[in-house]
Image (cartoon, coloured by chain):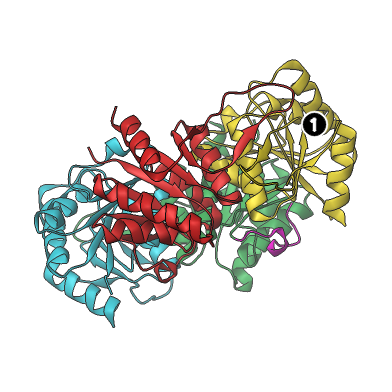
Chain colours: A yellow, B red, C cyan, D green
Amino acid sequence: MVVYVGVCGPDPAPPDVAAVAEEVGRLLAHEGAVVVCGGLGGTMEAVARGASGAGGTVVGILPGASRGQGNDFLTVAIPTGMGEMRNALVVRASDVVIAVAGEFGTLSEIAFALKTGTPVFGLRTWELSKPEREVADPIVRASDPHEAVRAALQLATS
Amino acid sequence: MVVYVGVCGPDPAPPDVAAVAEEVGRLLAHEGAVVVCGGLGGTMEAVARGASGAGGTVVGILPGASRGQGNDFLTVAIPTGMGEMRNALVVRASDVVIAVAGEFGTLSEIAFALKTGTPVFGLRTWELSKPEREVADPIVRASDPHEAVRAALQLATS
Amino acid sequence: MVVYVGVCGPDPAPPDVAAVAEEVGRLLAHEGAVVVCGGLGGTMEAVARGASGAGGTVVGILPGASRGQGNDFLTVAIPTGMGEMRNALVVRASDVVIAVAGEFGTLSEIAFALKTGTPVFGLRTWELSKPEREVADPIVRASDPHEAVRAALQLATS
Amino acid sequence: MVVYVGVCGPDPAPPDVAAVAEEVGRLLAHEGAVVVCGGLGGTMEAVARGASGAGGTVVGILPGASRGQGNDFLTVAIPTGMGEMRNALVVRASDVVIAVAGEFGTLSEIAFALKTGTPVFGLRTWELSKPEREVADPIVRASDPHEAVRAALQLATS
């Protein structure tokens, strides 16, 4: 069974974040996973470049109604015309999600994944807490791309 | 201009959270605001009960395809058939969002609001941080329903 | 139980179509039904004007992300940011649909309603046929607003 | 530039319709086009089988939240959790649409395509007319799979 891994993070992405995303994409392609992302720039472009460079399949689910807005490394580009609501579709299409750093869009993908029971693995991404009480971290933290990819695929195929 | 205020929080809701939500609904109705919520139980039902009891208008945007799943206090019930993706529609329909405590669904509404530029006011809700650096709290914290409603309406009408 | 009636038709609307839509809106409001429409101009504005002028409730489900694009006669305006895909939400929110004349947008609402089992009543609207075989007309045809409204509400409450 | 061709039709499909759809899929794959469909059975499965058997790429956009409901011939399967509203996404993802026979779901895809300016080619599919006036057929009729595929790709690449 092929595993679909959603990868999200900021756009634009600082160089160190882009490097991590590209490595995540490369490793996922090596493992035969399909990469799902939002199809635009920054982290989305970096993970797509990494995966496609390693011969992998990359699905980009785009916010606009035109395929032309997608980055150059998508195997399949899906325009939706739904705007930022497409973040939920990125998660729906994914068996697991890896979040790399990220801003509010990434947070929306993390939250939608957690709500719908899709496991989330995080590399230097959002930390979530509640006032006045302890909550277990709902994100599985990884220290580098190898650990994130290995843990994500292990869970998805178990 | 009528202000639409999205109110989100957990379902089911502990009694103290429900009491806060009901008071938020009552106050919003007094101020002539339209309450938008997810239309189901817990916080959604409490805010709807508070607002409708005070003569206000409550819009419930439902995850399923049947209006029958809505709570008893909705002025207008909108089935969507989109599942949890309807959380994004609750935010789209709101000028400002008030989050009361909450779990992952609430987090998804907070995140989608922040992503799309809709101001978020929080009552004992999620706290967000990033590793290794300081970020300004993107949620305007309030200590009680009066403060949350006053601040939310002030911003929405300014 | 309140009945929600989706009313769709062209935008812009020729004067005779607008007159029919306005009368449909007026009659629905007299019967206590909630009118659901796409919230913009033409037929959508005419039915909203008719219903709101008779004291009724009108829900406008808008394609864009801004409430400001709605016409002046909406009781509740719901921006979606989903573009033309919101046509499906207009149908989801309706117990029955009345189509008045119409172009391709109206056809999409008729089709989505028929697909999801929502009854469709038609006033001078699209006619559907298949090559090489007879199919029963899936649209209940009415000759004037009174007949359409009476038949739609009768079915919805039976 | 790769062309994405949405192919829609009934599920279940009579044998002659399935044969036509399979041939459409085979021809599209030969021409290097990506096939987009709703991912389930009947026509969707037939076109996917034809395309994948000829080495083509098939994207299935599924109504449910589980990838498992997709047929066995999809290169990429995208669960959406949006129910029948995903029909609009099938069209959004397509540069042109080929409709093979079909029921109300196909009609919804035809209508949404016409509304959003996506050209529609038809093989024995719905015929649309308006009462009391002539309208040009908005669907480009083809008499067999070769003609439909050739005309669709010619338009999409012109």
| Residue ID at (37%, 49%) | B24
Q: Residue furthest bottom?
A: C158
Q: Is residue C121 left or right of residue A143?
A: left
Residue in the picture at 43% in, 50% down: D112
Name the image quarter holding residue D39: bottom right
Determine whether A137 is above or below A75 in the image.
Answer: below
Which residue is under mark 1?
A52
What amino acid type is highlighted by mark number 1? Ser
A67 with respect to B95 (left or right): right
Q: Position of residue B155 (x, y in %)?
A: 35, 30
Q: Is residue B50 visible?
A: yes
Image point (48%, 67%), residue name:
D103
Asked where in the image residue B61 lies, by quadrant, the reply is bottom left
* Region rendered in magenta: D64-74
Foreground residue, A109 or C83?
A: A109
Would you say A38 lies left or right of D107 here?
Answer: right
Which one is in front, D153 or D40?
Answer: D40
Q: Secondary structure at mark 1?
A: helix
Residue C132 picture location, percent across and down: 43, 71
Front residue of D108 and B157? B157
Residue B90 place in picture, x, y as percent: 44, 48
- Relative to C143, does residue C80 appear above or below in the rendering? above
Q: Give x and y (percent) for residue D85.
A: 49, 56
Q: State the predominant SS element of the stretch in magenta.
A: loop
Quadrant of the image for the C terminus of chain C? bottom left
Task: From the viewer's side, name the closer residue of A144 and D90.
Answer: A144
